Image (cartoon, helix red, strand yellow):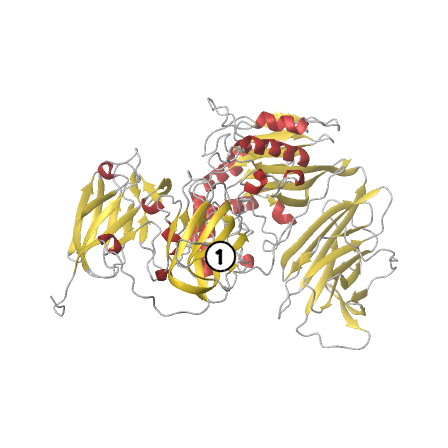
Amino acid sequence: MPPTHSQGRKMRDSLGVIVVAGVMLAASSALANGHQAQKNAGPTDQSGSATVTFTLAAPPDMPAEEGLVRAELICGGQPAATAELDTSDHPSVTMPLESLASDCQVSASWQAVDGLTHEATVEVSEGGDAIERWRRYTADGETTTREFHVPTGDAPQDLSVDVTVGAVPDGEVGTALRVMTFNIWLGGTLDPAQGAGMGEQNLDELLEFVRHEDPDVLFLVETYGAGADIEAALNRNRNDGREFTGVQITREPGQAPDRDNLWLYTWLPVEEVYERISGGGVSSFHFGGARLGLPDGGHVHAFSTWLHHQDNARTHANRAAFEETLGLCRHHTDDEVIGTDERNRVRMATTVLEDRLTTYVGDDDAPIIIGGDLNTLSHLDWSERFAPVFGHGGLVLDWPVTRMFTEAGFTDTYRWAYPDAGRYPGSTMDPARGQIFAPGRIDYVFTRGDDVRVLDSATLTERLPEQQGSALDDRFPFYSDHAAVVTDLVIRGSGTASAGNREPLSEDAADPHASWPDEPSGHAIPAGQLSATASTEAEHRGAERAVDGDIRTHWHSDAAVELPHEITIDMERVRRLSALRYQPRYDSAIGTILRATVQASRDGTDFTDVAEVEWDRTRLPKDVDLDGVTARYLRLQIEHSSGGDLSSAAQLIPYEKQRTGPPAWVPQPPSSGDDQDVVVTTQTVHADCAKAYTESGTWISSNLTGYDGSLTRYSNTAGSTATWVPELPTGGEYEVAVWWPDHATTTRSAHYSVEHADGSADVTIDPVDGMGDWYALGQWTFDAGTGGGVTLTVGSGYHRADALRFRLVEERTTSGDAD
């Protein structure tokens, strides 16, 4: 615990004495909100300076503290402001505040009384926004918050330090509960495609982790056959007289043994397991729980939950934030991003909040605890306040599902404990392989009830110390693709709220100064002067994508080819190099290169090692210093990557010392018709950032990938339309072809309307005849630009939208052209 700066102090008999940065100030007149402080040395001009206001209140269910409470703001290890308060005469004091060191704490102290325990809560706000919350139960007469970050700048904001202190008899505090929610990823056995046979070892270590954390209530998601093992682990070698019971929540009729998604575990008496109910998009696969007895005779309602992952909120927000950060064209509007909740999760949340809880809880005002994976982000994290935070891209996203929980009276316990989402993003995806660009907090512990007190919270993202350093830890530094979220609570009532010998929770803060790295020295070699080959390539993910100049495409290895992998860049001629920049995929950590050897060659035959690299799992670019290297070819020999035997690169960009002239002419093979293809997928945008693909009616994201690995959509709502508008470089006659994803559930009659330079044409095809390949609709004349297009109108059956190809057959000539 940091020093309180109040040891040995003598409680004063009167109020109104304030210390600001070591200078004594005296109250000159009482104001409505406290005292106005002035320096004894004489008046000074405080216009334009920030202030700090200390306030004191009592907790809602406790009597006010009768004596003095001393509150002190400590910044950079030095007292910055001090106030002595009481709730009767001087509950608030405001004073000028000079510039602060960025890391501060608040210490509060009062007269300890034998036989009483004090509840102390501190909330610090800057410009009206909470930046720190802290609550403790103590008989020592003092508490000190963790360090918190105070934004500094040319225009400092006013600070508020709100302290609540109240006392109850030692035996009337309540019951301390540590609650944990954990999606354990396919029963704790890893993705079999990436686990390299380490699944059973991972499960064994996960069981030890759960036993070590020893929560009082544990909510599990994706339990999938591990339920009995978890219960046994929690009961292994116990000497505290407690016995854990596992409650299988998911119990659908006829379900396979390994489809038991949700479980709940506790040593508290299970007084009732709530009946299985289906309807409204929610079954026991998604929600259920039990009433748990408390030692004082009370009870809580505990529920485990999982909301559907489609459409994927996290990936849509990540792409939008990434594009905004780098100034790229947006593929999804803000409304489309938060609209991902509408497909399933809004309906499911409505069912949970308005139907299931009413059925299970009724009018009972006992505390409710909900833990689980909501598969969506929080409106509290993506508010206007946090739009400037690195990784948010300036986005303001009012996520509807979490707002529904807030409006239903629930507290997001992690965000209560850490109100500064910039400093504490709390990302829960994906500690096993690496986080994507934007914060991804999708796992939650919610509470509701007057008797619930949140103390602290944390995300757990590392293996136990004794498990680190192994081959498994090297491949997957955590047990699951979800972090575990842990929250410490007190349920007010009888009892001392003792936490035993548990270590207090803590959370590492993010770097408040994080930003996109500057380019390395030298000049980036243009993509048009680069080509690449690789020892392994996945379909539609060739090596050329790593040097195509588009940060949103990527090379990826074939999943069937084990490490090591190689990718080689040809820079057309020998160059004096300064650096190599490796840009990982922005949308996934899978395949992120972690360890590799960089080699260089002049002739493409004899390669020399020039650097050994070890990189982190973030989405930020990683640079290699190549000062003094002269080469035409660069090769990465990849030894270790995130997510198993997979490698990927969004971009590999060599930098040369100084820009050189155009390369000597090198004979090239004749161009094919493919070189002039214009392909429009569901993600294509035009040069002006206008969408090349638009929809009307109802369309749904599909798990099927289409041409070039693109995302596909489907609809069976008659009258819905999908339209592709190409951006053609030249006018002429084009062959138009459609790529229809291969799926057994497909209409036998798909109607297309083609808008071309000479009018329009209607074409009806049977897609089954050409699924998984290009199906030619016909040839028409189009003008250059975006004047033409093709529209698919849904009739009967399932229609699928992916890609349209426009292949130039004959370029249009004008009267001024030579024969």
- Front residue of 35 and 220: 220
Residue nearer the viewer, 413 or 645: 645
Instruction: Tell me the quarter of the picture where residue 74 sits.
Output: bottom right
Would residue 436 be found to the left or right of residue 682 on screen?
A: right
Q: Secondary structure at mark 1?
A: loop
Q: Residue furthest top?
A: 254
Mark 1: which amino acid? Leu
Image quarter of the C terminus: bottom left
The image shows residue 471 at horizontal and vertical percentages of 57, 39
Identify the residue shown where x is 69% and y is 26%. Answer: 243
Rendered location of residue 717, percent (x, y): 31, 40
Judging depth in this view, the residue of 549 and 29 nearest the camera is: 549
Q: How many marks?
A: 1
Camera-side residue of 514 and 307: 514
86 versus 279 height, above or below: below
Residue 342 appears in the rendering: yes
The residue that label 1 is drawn on is 395
Residue 179 vs 55, above or below: the answer is above
Task: Single out the residue that lies furthest toward the front.
Answer: 606
Residue 257 is situated, as x and y percent measured from the top left of the image, at: 50, 23
Residue at (52, 58) in percent of width and height: 387
Residue 214 makes an appearance in the image: no
List x then y, in percent, for residue 565.
45, 45
46 left or right of 531? right
- Packing grade of label 1 (10 A; few <14, some 14-19, many >=20) is many
